[in-house]
């Protein structure tokens, strides 16, 4: 049952409830208090995320079909009200990442900004990237074109110092280097920290795979809601147009600082494979997603495959087998394995028993089985 203070309701039906989110606590307020939120840009449409059209639409359908329970809804709302990151732990395949997409879909917060973590990921990867070599190369081509257009000019080859001056955007009589913004792109975290009218959803996926220092490196950004870009700082207060993690879109950065108007909904997922520093844990709302029960699995099947598939006899049998393996054999099974098995069970229904058994054994093979 929905409570009055809930912004996210877990229904999967998009609505404008984010407009009713109360102001941030004083210790989590960001941006200029005198600015007009209506002047800030809205997030791009949900289906504008990078990737094929079919894949994007599949993500939207998956988000709409997510079955959030009351505890999950309550903790998501705590993170929204407190402007704190949401740390989600759970076994692989229980829907940790999908919850982020479900919240963004229901609250119309635009495409999810996803940062997939590996052991080589650094804070800089999430904030921005700068192609200095590409800019240096284009600056050289620009100068060469100018010489060809003016054969009477200085015939001496350009020096390394000349190119360095070009990249610093220092005044020169010769053509200026290409705009730096063409070679600078904000990462998922950097894009989420732009001043949006409504908070963006940032998914930092599988944070437990990171280098030991990354969780601590994130703390300062989470606390300040801003970061500096040194390559832009030295250019002064003039606005610079840069690329973003939103496919094909740009943003304007002023004074070399990216500062959020309100803190994004940051969702960190973990498979529970490592412990995190207490400094990070105390700044997060922590949610553990448990393995779904029979009722929730049946609702998930109905949402993805339809009511007819959910009512079929083989569906009840496969759900029972799925749960039996989880409980009795301590098998790690993902929800999408069940969906795959049910989809194929319907297609091989008219084959012999051996074919149906093969579908079950292959598609419901535990993830922790070698």
Image (cartoon, rainbow, N blue to C red):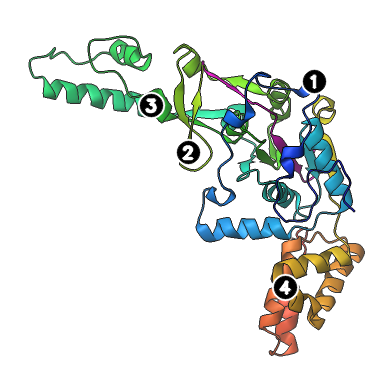
Above or below, comparing residue 122 to residue 163 in the picture: below
Q: Secondary structure at mark 4?
A: loop
Which numbered disc flags the more N-terminal residue, 3 or 1? 1
Q: Which residue is mark 2?
A: 249
Q: How far apart, in angstroms, are the residues tagged by discs 3 and 1? A: 43 Å
Q: Which residue is mark 4?
A: 306
Q: How far apart, in angstroms, are the residues tagged by discs 2 and 4? A: 36 Å
Residue drawn 15% across the image and 20% down it: 147
Above or below, comparing residue 158 to residue 141 in the picture: above
Q: How far apart, in angstroms, are the residues tagged by discs 2 and 3? A: 22 Å
Q: Which residues are magenta?
A: 255-276
Residue drawn 69% across the image and 33% down it: 264
Tag 1: Cα neighbours inside 10 Å, few (<14), some, or many (≥20)? few
Q: Are marks 2 and 1 in contact (CB under 8 Å)?
A: no
Magenta stretch holds residue 263: yes
For the question of whether residue 276 can be seen, the reply is no
> Which is more foreground, mark 2 or mark 1?
1
Tag 4: Cα neighbours inside 10 Å, few (<14), some, or many (≥20)? few
Tag 2: Cα neighbours inside 10 Å, few (<14), some, or many (≥20)? few
Q: For residue 340, what is the image quadrant?
A: bottom right
Where is residue 333? Give x, y as percent.
Answer: 79, 61
Tell me the number on the disc at residue 133.
3
Q: How far apart, in angstroms, are the residues tagged by discs 1 and 4? A: 46 Å
Tell me the number on the disc at residue 26.
1
Where is residue 260? Give x, y as percent.
Answer: 64, 26
């Amino acid at each position: 049952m929905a409570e009055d203070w809930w912004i996210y309701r877990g229904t999967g039906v998009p609505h404008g409830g984010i407009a009713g989110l109360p102001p941030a606590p004083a210790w989590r307020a960001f941006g200029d208090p005198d600015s007009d939120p209506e002047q800030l840009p809205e997030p791009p449409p949900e289906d504008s995320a990078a990737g094929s059209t079919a894949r994007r639409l599949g993500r939207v359908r998956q988000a709409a079909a997510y079955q959030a329970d009351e505890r999950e809804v309550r903790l998501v709302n705590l993170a929204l009200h407190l402007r704190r990151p949401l740390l989600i732990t759970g076994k692989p395949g229980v829907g940790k990442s999908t919850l982020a997409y479900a919240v963004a879909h229901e609250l119309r917060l635009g495409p999810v900004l996803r940062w997939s973590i590996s052991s080589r990921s650094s804070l800089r990867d999430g904030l921005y990237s700068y192609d200095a070599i590409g800019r240096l190369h284009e600056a050289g081509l620009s100068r060469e074109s100018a010489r060809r257009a003016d054969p009477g000019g200085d015939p001496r080859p350009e020096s390394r110092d000349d190119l360095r001056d070009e990249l610093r955007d220092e005044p020169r009589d010769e053509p200026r280097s290409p705009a730096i913004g063409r070679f600078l792109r904000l990462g998922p975290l950097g894009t989420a920290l732009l001043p949006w009218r409504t908070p963006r959803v940032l998914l930092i996926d599988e944070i437990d795979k990171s280098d030991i220092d990354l969780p601590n490196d994130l703390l300062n950004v989470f606390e300040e809601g801003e970061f500096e870009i040194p390559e832009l700082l030295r250019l002064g207060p003039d606005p610079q147009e840069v690329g973003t993690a939103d496919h094909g879109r740009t943003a304007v950065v002023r004074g070399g600082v990216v500062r959020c108007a309100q803190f994004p909904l940051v969702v960190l997922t973990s498979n529970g494979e490592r412990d995190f520093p207490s400094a990070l844990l105390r700044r997060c709302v922590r949610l553990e997603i448990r393995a779904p029960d029979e009722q929730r699995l049946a609702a998930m099947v109905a949402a993805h495959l339809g009511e007819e598939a959910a009512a079929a006899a083989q569906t009840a049998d496969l759900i029972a087998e799925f749960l039996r393996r989880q409980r009795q054999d301590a098998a790690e099974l993902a929800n999408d394995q069940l969906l795959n098995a049910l989809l194929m069970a319907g297609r091989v229904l008219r084959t012999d028993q051996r074919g149906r058994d093969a579908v079950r054994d292959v598609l419901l093979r535990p993830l922790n089985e070698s």
